């Protein structure tokens, strides 16, 4: 420990750090050192390492030797600047900034002009021949030091400034004269005394020590901790502290300050893009009091400085091989770089920059692919809220399906469909959705539900349709009779406009301006490169030929899940489905199923055609049957109406019969009840009909020469014997059709692994299954014991209280559910080493889960059509990340 180095110099005569030392020096410190190494002018300074932060926050004291090292570094800084820290005639002034490995809002940020006190301020005034400038710097320093080091809110100081301006009858800070600034300095010092009980520290060394302590302490403030949790930043990284000599952009017309990007951060265009202010300090640019000039204007006012800046920005971009966000200050004609970092950019810009940099030979394809964040793809595929729009957010729920939508509120699926026929845009607001609402969901612009989590019906279906959805918005209450919803004192009536943002979960009152998605060639290029890199396949969940076609356009290589229950709805079909459910004998049921068969066959034919040449996994019926019957309350209401208007006995009897059916199918826990393969065991004729429809469609298409690969999937299996029994039903129904057609279809029979017992006994199940597909929605539900429809009520507080880092229905819980997936894969492949295994739960389109899937050996992931591009990208990034490990 004794020989350990804790402080690294940069700039001027000596630079000890470099870019690759980000872990130790933080991003800011490492890049300052790197700029100095490149011969780019940076004001000299030093960086105290992140290791000091870790030890200091752990032991509550500095490791031995650190403070001596800081003192020695300070002496070198004095020498380099030819100024003394605390010298009343020619004072060295410093900036102190935090700088973690990644930029981290929430931590102490910056203190400027440190070293000023009642004496050095006069030295600064003399040295610059500008007393006003010196006192302006002093009052700014007092405010910043108070805010970030002493914890006294800035408003305390702002109030005094405002009062003084009012007294003088002026509007701008710049109009305050020297006497006013001197007066404010005195006042500010008394605020500090009143708040802390101590005088403002006049000793510059004490100021420096306090500022360094404050940076390190800010690593553990609540905001910083929260930010780390949200962004998966480990607590043991620590932050570095950068202490740097001040340079001034406010020393006259040959001084200035600015920020710039090496490419346009909004469009990605290759051009120098930035702005600057003459005779100003950095915070003036941020404060927006004066309007900065475009960077090109510098060419006229200070051509040599502009040329130098252009050389530097090109050098920086070439060196870092990425778009840079730079900050500079010009002090009396001399240019200094204060910062360079990877520039933030819009999704559109990210794609363009990555593709163009590859073409320019600056980066390779893998780097280009790894530069695009999966969440950015969502932004180019869906409409988004205009970032400049003012938002009246009235409630927040779960961000269940990305994109933003505007429409008039409706409360029933029928109303949504009706309004859509009139050409009106609606937002469908429901307590929760059920399969019956599908038509209305399709007809609306977006869906808002009070209940339900990230894998609730609304979320899954909306995602499949590529429609924005906010689910589990528990703050609102719907009054269906009054046709309104309320949240606190806000009431939204049917027909009122709302905007929902399915990417953030926000519900906004009124019509907000949206930005349309812009599909670009660059996205295709990046995804094409990703396809060449990735090793797992990406399929899509799709239930209709239309969805299948969209999925193909997005690059899906097959269907990983076709939920056949969605084919049971619609005006023509639902009465037949109800006939089937209400049948009093097996014969009656068969008759109803015979009517359904051609309809199902038509759907399968369409889907197979859209997916020609690719595998299509069709899941046999899964949901509990009551979901296909009308709601009990609605039926009772209808019965009352019929009776009161003296309807025919036969009509009344029919409703009574339906009520009887609903009551007999009622279950306490339908999600754990009579559903999935349990239906196939008790009503084998339903599965028989579905298999016949699949194989008939396949036989017809085969005759036409269309290549198809059906995979028949059995849901909710927990015991191998369930699969064994159903497989026999499937095989004999399929054989019957093939014999009839004189044809042979190569098809597979496999199962979903979506219950813990199935994962744990996957070796037995693999004896019967020809493929596995992990249903991680149900697997998450049953592993945690969290109902996927009710978890929205408590999961937000779990995340708030750091019990869980993320919603496990959105991001796969690798530790628990993921472990079951791993066990399932290992055991399954123990029995059949070639077993094809995929995932079709919602996690199949979530980047971290896709990467996990790649690492544990899945053959494919399957997700809703609009998430296919995300999965393609994430699957490639998994390969690249492993290679770079
Ligand atoms: C699952 O459970 O993960 C799954 C894909 O099936 P569903 O969401 O239809 O239950
Ligand atoms: Mg399931």
Image (cartoon, grey):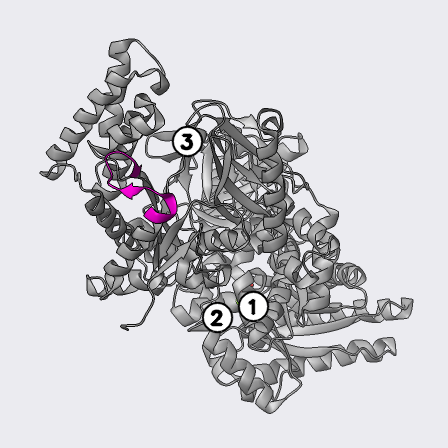
Query: How far, Cα to Cα, is label 2 from label 3?
Result: 56 Å
Q: Secondary structure beneath disc 1?
A: helix
Residue 232, position as x, y percentages in the image: 42, 60
Residue bearing mark 3: 281
Q: Which residue is mark 2?
A: 779
The answer to the question of whether label 1 and label 2 lie on touching residues, with beta carbons closer than 8 A, is no
Crowding near pointer 2: few (<14 within 10 Å), some, many (20+)?
many
Q: Which mark is residue 140?
A: none
Q: Position of residue 614 (x, y in %)?
A: 77, 68
Q: CA distance from mark 3 to mark 1?
A: 45 Å
- Relative vertical location of residue 480 with respect to residue 374 in this rendering, above or below: above
Say which element carries label 3: loop
Is 246 one of the magenta-colored residues? no
Mark 1 vs mark 2, foreground winner is 1
Q: Residue at x 21, y 34 (%)?
A: 117
For residue 851, the mark is 1
- The answer to whether mark 2 is within 8 Å of ligand 1 is yes
């Amino acid at each position: 420990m004794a020989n350990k180095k804790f402080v690294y110099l940069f700039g001027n005569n000596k630079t000890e750090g470099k870019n690759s030392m980000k872990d130790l020096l933080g991003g800011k410190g490492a890049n300052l050192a790197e700029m100095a190494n490149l011969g780019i002018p940076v004001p000299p300074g030093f960086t105290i390492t992140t290791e000091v932060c870790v030890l200091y926050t752990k032991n509550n004291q500095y490791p031995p030797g650190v403070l001596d090292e800081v003192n020695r570094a300070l002496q070198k800084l004095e020498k380099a600047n030819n100024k003394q820290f605390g010298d009343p005639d020619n004072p060295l002034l410093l900036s102190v900034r935090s700088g973690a490995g990644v930029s981290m809002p929430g931590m102490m940020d910056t203190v400027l002009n440190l070293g000023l006190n009642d004496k050095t301020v006069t030295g600064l005034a003399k040295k610059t021949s500008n007393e006003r400038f010196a006192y302006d710097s002093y009052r700014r320093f007092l405010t910043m030091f108070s805010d970030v080091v002493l914890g006294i809110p800035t408003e305390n100081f702002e109030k005094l400034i405002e009062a003084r301006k009012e007294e003088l009858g002026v509007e701008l800070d710049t109009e305050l004269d020297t006497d006013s600034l001197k007066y404010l300095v005195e006042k500010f010092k008394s605020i500090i005394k009143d708040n802390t009980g101590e005088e403002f520290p006049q000793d510059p060394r004490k100021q420096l020590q306090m500022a360094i302590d404050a940076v390190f302490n800010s690593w553990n403030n609540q905001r910083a901790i929260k930010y780390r949790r949200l962004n998966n930043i480990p607590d043991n990284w620590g932050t570095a502290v950068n202490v740097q000599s001040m340079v001034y952009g406010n020393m006259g017309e040959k001084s200035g300050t600015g920020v710039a990007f090496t490419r346009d951060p909004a469009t990605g265009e290759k051009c120098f893009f930035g702005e600057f202010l003459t005779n100003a300090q950095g915070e003036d640019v941020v404060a927006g009091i004066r309007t900065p000039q475009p960077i090109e204007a510098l060419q006229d006012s200070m051509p040599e400085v502009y040329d130098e800046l252009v050389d530097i920005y090109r050098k920086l971009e070439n060196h870092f091989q990425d778009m840079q966000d730079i900050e500079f200050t010009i002090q009396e004609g001399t240019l200094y770089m204060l910062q360079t970092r990877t520039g933030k950019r819009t999704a559109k810009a990210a794609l363009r920059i990555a593709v163009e940099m590859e073409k320019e030979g600056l980066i390779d394809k893998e780097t280009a692919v790894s530069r695009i964040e999966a969440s950015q793809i969502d932004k180019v595929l869906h409409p988004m809220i205009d970032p400049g729009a003012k938002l009246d957010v009235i409630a927040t729920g779960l961000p269940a399906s990305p994109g933003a939508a505007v429409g008039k509120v409706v409360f029933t699926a029928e109303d949504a469909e009706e309004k859509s026929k009139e050409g009106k845009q609606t937002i469908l607001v429901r307590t929760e959705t059920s399969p019956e609402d599908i038509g209305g969901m399709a007809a609306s612009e977006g869906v808002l539900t009070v209940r339900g989590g990230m894998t609730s019906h609304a979320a899954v279906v909306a995602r499949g349709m590529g429609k924005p959805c906010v689910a589990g918005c528990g703050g609102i209450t719907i009054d269906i009779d009054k046709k309104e919803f309320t949240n606190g004192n806000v009431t939204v009536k049917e027909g009122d406009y709302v905007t929902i943002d399915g990417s953030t979960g926000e519900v906004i009152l009124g019509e907000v301006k949206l930005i349309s998605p812009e599909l670009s060639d660059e996205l295709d290029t990046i995804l094409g490169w990703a396809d060449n890199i990735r090793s797992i396949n990406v399929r899509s969940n799709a239930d209709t030929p239309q969805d299948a076609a969209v999925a193909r356009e997005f690059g899906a290589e097959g269907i990983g899940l076709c939920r056949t229950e969605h084919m049971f709805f619609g005006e023509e079909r639902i009465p037949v489905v109800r006939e089937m459910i209400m049948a009093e004998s097996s014969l009656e049921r068969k008759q109803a199923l015979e009517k359904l068969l051609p309809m199902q066959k038509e759907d399968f034919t369409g889907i197979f055609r859209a997916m020609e040449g690719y595998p299509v996994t069709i899941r046999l019926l899964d949901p509990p049957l009551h979901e296909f019957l009308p709601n009990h309350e609605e039926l009772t209401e209808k019965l009352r109406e019929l009776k009161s208007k003296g309807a025919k006995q036969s009509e009344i009897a029919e409703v009574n019969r339906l009520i009887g059916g609903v009551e007999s199918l009622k279950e306490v826990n339908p999600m754990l009840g009579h559903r999935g393969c349990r239906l196939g065991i008790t009503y084998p004729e339903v599965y028989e009909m579905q298999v016949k429809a699949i194989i008939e469609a396949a036989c017809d298409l085969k005759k036409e020469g269309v290549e198809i690969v059906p995979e028949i999937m059995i849901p909710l299996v927990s015991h191998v014997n369930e699969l064994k029994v159903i497989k026999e039903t499937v095989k004999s129904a399929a054989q019957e059709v093939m014999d009839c057609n004189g044809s042979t279809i190569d098809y597979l029979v496999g199962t979903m692994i979506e219950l813990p017992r199935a994962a744990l006994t996957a070796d037995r199940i693999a004896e019967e299954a020809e493929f596995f597909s992990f249903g991680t929605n149900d697997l998450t539900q049953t592993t945690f014991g969290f109902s996927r429809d009710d978890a929205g009520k408590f999961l937000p507080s779990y995340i708030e209280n750091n019990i869980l880092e993320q919603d496990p229905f959105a991001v796969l819980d690798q530790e628990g559910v993921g472990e079951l997936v791993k066990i399932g894969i290992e055991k399954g492949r123990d029995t059949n080493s070639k077993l094809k295994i995929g995932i079709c739960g919602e996690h199949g389109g979530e980047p971290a889960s896709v990467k996990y899937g790649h690492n544990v050996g899945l053959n494919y992931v399957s997700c809703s059509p609009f998430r296919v591009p995300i999965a393609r990208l994430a699957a490639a990034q998994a390969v690249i990340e492993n290679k770079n490990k």
